[in-house]
Image: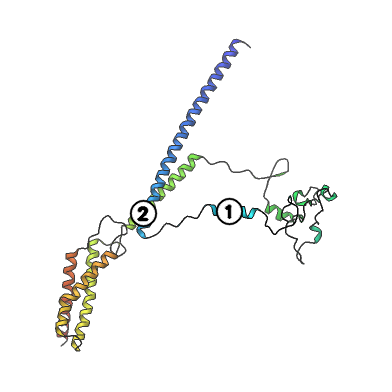
């Protein structure tokens, strides 16, 4: 080999070495970016979880208790081992398979060969086949007590039950597994889902900042409607008291006291409590205004006005 060939080979190896270093550096940068994206996404998910907990506490939903992690793992372990009441064989034997079904619709007894007495019996050397010139496998080995062959399925059902991919050689092999997902693609999908969760969380916060009573109304209009409604209800009670006074059940002093002070005060405090109970948003900073002077004025005007309207109506009918 000449010197020029050695030099060309050295240059090729140097180029390959530099390409490997560049690839390793690019892979390191990619991994570092992926780790940074994972940390950022973890912080976002943690903040979202805390915000959802706050929303749940605001609407009165408690977090469900988490199930213990050891309970699901104990179930497979308990079901994997044979029960104490199954079989009476030697320590090396497993639990016996269930007996073949009997009846008119079950296969004949010839399809379920009787178990042999030991592993060295002649039937162990010549295991029954499947009928196509192939051995029956572990299902046809009668070397264990109580172990019978598996029931054979028709060809169509077998193809439906065990899907396989046909290789070029003609033998059935299991289907190939799906390729591993790209971490960058999975992180992008997770980021989009986190953005969607943020959007729904903002909508939930906007809904939580609205009260249950007249949510689309302004606070002033809501307060006026509530105090006016309570005053109207008190006006109905005033009319009932007037009718009771006409038949002699209520005297004049009691009627005047309820009209001038009692029923207006009841209407005012009723509106105040309604605004505090149903007019308060689930999530709000501070106490929402209840407009006490406006409510006092409305309640102490509506009730006497209702009494005056009743008097005018009675006189007009006369």
Q: Could you tell me residue 148's position as x and y percent?
A: 77, 55
Q: Could you tell me if the residues under marks 1 and 2 are in contact, i.e. CB atoms within 8 Å?
A: no
Q: Residue 317's mark?
A: none
Q: Which residue is mark 2?
A: 54
On-image quarter of the N terminus = top right
Q: Residue furthest right?
A: 122
Q: Which residue is mark 1?
A: 74
On-image quarter of the C terminus = bottom left
Q: How many numbered marks appear?
A: 2
Report crowding for label 2: few under 14, some 14 to 19, many 20 or more residues within 10 A (C-alpha).
some
Report crowding for label 1: few under 14, some 14 to 19, many 20 or more residues within 10 A (C-alpha).
few
Q: Residue furthest top?
A: 3
Left or right: residue 312 compared with residue 185: left
Q: Residue at x 21, y 77 (%)?
A: 235
Q: Could you tell me residue 181's position as x and y percent?
A: 53, 41
Q: Residue at x 35, y 52 (%)?
A: 202
Q: Could you tell me residue 159's position as x and y percent?
A: 70, 52
In the structure shown, which secondary structural element does the residue marked by tag 1 occupy? helix
Q: How is the image coloured?
A: rainbow
Q: Residue at x 56, y 54 (%)?
A: 72
In the rendered image, the vertical position of residue 215 relative to residue 28, given as above or below: below
In the rendered image, the vertical position of residue 316 relative to residue 45, given as above or below: below
Mark 1 or mark 2: whose residue is earlier in sequence: 2
In the structure shown, which secondary structural element does the residue marked by tag 2 occupy? helix
Snapshot quadrant of residue 167: top right
């Amino acid at each position: 080999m000449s010197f020029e060939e050695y030099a060309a080979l050295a240059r090729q190896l140097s180029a390959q070495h530099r390409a490997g270093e560049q690839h390793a550096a690019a892979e390191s940068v990619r991994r570092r970016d992926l780790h940074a994206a994972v940390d950022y996404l973890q912080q976002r998910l943690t903040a979202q979880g805390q915000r959802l907990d706050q929303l749940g506490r605001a609407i009165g939903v408690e977090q469900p208790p988490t199930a213990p992690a050891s309970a699901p793992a104990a179930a497979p372990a308990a079901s994997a081992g044979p029960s104490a009441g199954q079989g009476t064989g030697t320590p090396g034997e497993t639990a016996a398979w269930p007996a073949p079904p009997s009846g008119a619709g079950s296969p004949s007894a010839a399809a379920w060969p009787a178990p042999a007495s030991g592993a060295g019996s002649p039937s162990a050397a010549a295991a029954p086949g499947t009928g196509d010139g192939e051995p029956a496998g572990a299902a046809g080995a009668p070397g264990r007590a109580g172990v019978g062959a598996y029931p054979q399925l028709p060809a169509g059902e077998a193809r439906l039950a065990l899907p396989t991919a046909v290789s070029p050689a003609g033998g059935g092999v299991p289907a190939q597994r799906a390729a591993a997902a790209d971490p960058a693609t999975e992180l992008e999908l997770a980021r989009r889902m986190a953005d969607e969760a943020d959007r729904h969380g903002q909508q939930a916060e906007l809904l939580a900042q609205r009260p249950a009573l007249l949510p689309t109304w302004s606070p002033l209009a809501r307060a006026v409607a509530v105090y006016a409604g309570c005053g109207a209800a008190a006006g109905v009670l005033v009319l009932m008291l007037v009718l009771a006074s006409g038949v002699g059940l209520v005297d004049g002093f009691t009627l005047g006291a309820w009209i001038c002070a009692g029923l207006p005060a009841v209407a005012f405090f009723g509106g105040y409590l309604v605004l505090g109970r149903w007019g308060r948003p689930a999530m709000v900073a501070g106490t929402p205004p209840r407009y006490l002077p406006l409510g006092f004025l409305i309640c102490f005007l509506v009730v006497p006005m209702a009494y005056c309207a009743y008097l005018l109506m009675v006189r007009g009918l006369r």
